[in-house]
Structures are given as C-alpha cells and as structure tokens.
Amino acid sequence: MARRKTTEGGLTKAAAIRDILRTDPDIKPQEGIALVKERHGIDVTTNVFSMYRGKEKMKPAVKPDRRGRKKSGDAPLTLEDLLKAKTMIEEFGGLNRLHQAVAALAKLS
C-alpha cells in the first residue's frame, strides 16, 4: 500500500481542506484554495478541493449507533425493585402465575 503524501506539518491535502471547511463549510473553491495555501502551504487544485468538499457534505453529522437492539430496562435493579417483585409474586400466588400474567399481558400489547 502506498504512503500518503504529507507536508512537513504532517497534514494531507484532505486534512488541510477539512480544516478550512470546519471554519466555513460554504466557502468557494478559489477562496478555499487560497486559504489552504496560506495556512498550510499546500498547493491544491480546484477539482481536488471540490471533490473533498463534496465528500464532507455527504458525510452524516452524527453516525447512527446500530449495534444491536436497545434494551428497555437497562437500569440496574435496586433493592426496592426486588422487594416490589417479591410482593407481586406473593399477591399472584407464586412465580408461575405471575409469569403467566406477564405473558398474557405481552400478547395483548
């Protein structure tokens, strides 16, 4: 794999253009090229600047988190929660009956 061309400061053309676009995302290519040359000392063509600007505009602002399903009860169980569950088990006459009631309720919704 080929190495990326960088300047003495360690910036690539893309990184320099992203730096300029952070300050003004709607900058015109000629103005952006002048700023890249002034700030970073990198020569960039209009086509290269426009290409990287287009790529930056296509990126979503925030990447969605799609790793697995969201769980509804992620909070840890407290002692109070466990005592309430114990009371419900006693009111329903056992764990099996409570489980049947919860399963029937799940079918309704």
Image (cartoon, rainbow, N blue to C red):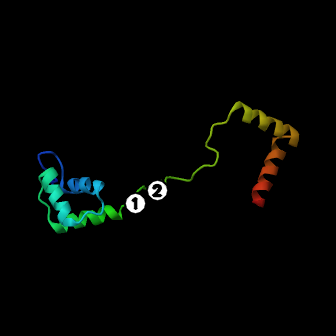
Evaluate whether residue 1 shows in this view. no
Q: Quadrant location of residue 43?
A: bottom left
State the image coordinates of residue 49 (x, y, percent, origin top left): 20, 64
Name which residue type carries label 1.
Pro
Instruction: Report if the CB atoms under discs 1 and 2 are less than 8 Å apart.
Output: yes
Drawn side of residue 6 relative to residue 64, left or right: left
Name which residue type carries label 2.
Pro
State the image coordinates of residue 78 (x, y, percent, origin top left): 68, 33
Residue at the disc numbered 2: 64
Query: Which quarter of the rendering shows the C terminus?
Result: bottom right
Badge 1: few (under 14), some or many (20 or more) residues near its Cα, within 10 Å? few
State the image coordinates of residue 10 (x, y, percent, origin top left): 16, 46
Residue depicted at 20% across the width and 61% down the height: 32
Disc count in the image?
A: 2
Residue depicted at 79% across the width and 55% down the height: 105
Residue depicted at 18% across the width and 69% down the height: 47
Residue at the disc numbered 1: 60
State the image coordinates of residue 65 (x, y, percent, origin top left): 47, 53
Element class at badge 2: loop
**Mark 1 or 2, which is nearer the eye?**
1
Q: Quadrant location of residue 63?
A: bottom left
Which residue of the protein is positioned furthest toward the top in this rendering?
A: 79
* Residue 96, placed above or below residue 22: above
Element class at badge 1: loop
Badge 2: few (under 14), some or many (20 or more) residues near its Cα, within 10 Å? few
Between residues 51 and 79, which one lies in front from this camera angle?
A: 51
Drawn side of residue 68 relative to residue 1, left or right: right
Evaluate whether residue 82 shows in this view. yes
